Amino acid sequence: MDIKVLRNFLKIAEYENITRAAAELHIAQPHLTRQLHALEQELGVTLFVREKKRLHITDEGRFLRQQALHITDLADKTATQLLDMKSGLSGTLYFGAIETVGMIYLPTWIEGFRAQYPDVKYNMWSGNSTDVMERLAKHLVDIALIREPYDVNLYEAIHLLDEQWMVLMHPSHRLAVQAKHFVTWEELSQEELMVPTQRIEEISGWFAEKELPCRITCAFSPLANAVAMVEHNLGVAILPDSACHALHGRNLKAIPIEDSPTSGVAVLWHRQTELTGVTKRFIEYLKAVSRR
C-alpha cells in the first residue's frame, strides 16, 4: 500500500464523497475513483458501499481508516525525525501523557530542558493510560507518562511517585458539609460512584476485599465528563490526587479516602528501540531531575 493512496483514502472516508475529496486533494475525480477501486482490489475487500451520490464506509473500511491513521502518523513522525537527525540536537520530542499528571509535569520538564536546548520542538498528546500505551507501542510517541503497571520487559522507566486516591464531590454533598478529613470505605459503599473507565475492575476489587458493596453508576473518560457530573451533584467521583489538583479553582471538594491504595506514576520509553539523539538527551535530563 502506498502512503499517498492511504492519505487519499482517508480524505474519501472523511467526506464520504469522492467528488468533494478530489476537490480537496486537487486531483481529478476519475483518477481518485480508479485509485479507490485499485486499493479495494489489492486488499480484496469493499471499503465503501455506494448509494446514490453518497458513500457509506464498511466495517473493513473503518478498520483500514484506523490503521491508516496510525501508519500516516508514523510516516510523518519518521520523516520529521530523519530531518532532525541532520541538524543535531534540534529535533522534535513526541510525548504521550495521561491528562492530569501531564499537566503537572510536562510544563516543568520542558521549561528546564528548553533552557538548555532552545531549538528543540515538542509534540504532546494526552489521553488515559491505555490510549497512551497504545501510541507508545506503535512508536507514535517517544516518551509516555502513564499510570503503572507496565511491561518491564518492553519498557524502561523512571518511577515518579505514588499518589493516593480521593473522592471528588459537590460542595453541598453531605460528606463535604460534614467537613470530614477523610472518607471511610463504609461511607463510600453507600454512594453512587463515578470511576475512570480503565479502573473499574481495580476499584471494584478494593470494595470486594472489604466485603462492601460497590455502586458504580458511571464510568468516565476523559476527566471532564466526571467533572460535569459532579458539578450537577449526580454522585461522587473516585480520582487520583493529581486529577483533583488539576481542578484547583473549581467549586468542588476533594477528600482523601481512608487507608487509600496508591497509584504509581512512571515515565516510559522503549527498551529495544534506537532512540533519537534528542530523546536520549531528554531521558538523561529526566534521570538527573528525578535524583534531586
Image (tube, helix red, strand yellow):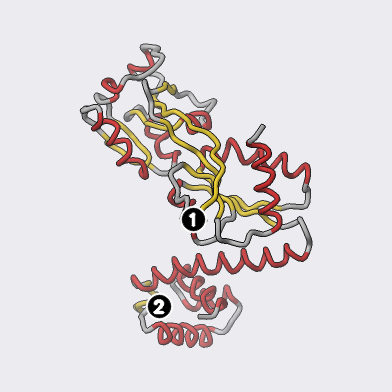
In front of the other: 50 or 68 = 68
**139 relative position to 184: left or right:** right
Is 203 left, or right, of 153 in this rendering?
Answer: left
Q: Position of residue 22 (x, y in %)?
A: 54, 78
Q: Amino acid at mark 1?
A: Leu
Q: For the residue marked with disc 2, what is the amino acid?
A: Lys
Would you identify the image quadrant in which residue 47 lies?
bottom left
Residue 175: image location, x then y, percent: 34, 17
Q: Nearer the viewer, residue 73 or 165?
A: 165
Front residue of 218 and 272: 272
In terms of image quadrants, where is residue 84? bottom right
Q: Quadrant of the C terminus?
A: top right
- Residue 57: image location, x then y, percent: 38, 72
Decide which of tag 1 and tag 2 comes sooner along the chain: 2
Q: Residue at x 48, y 88 (%)?
A: 34
Residue occupying the point 65% across, 42% down: 286
Q: Secondary structure at mark 1?
A: loop
Which residue in the protein does label 1 denote?
154
Looking at the image, which residue sits at the far top?
Answer: 178
As drawn, the residue found furthest toward the front would be 153
From mark 1 to mark 2, how far is it between C-alphas?
A: 48 Å
Residue denoted by label 2: 53
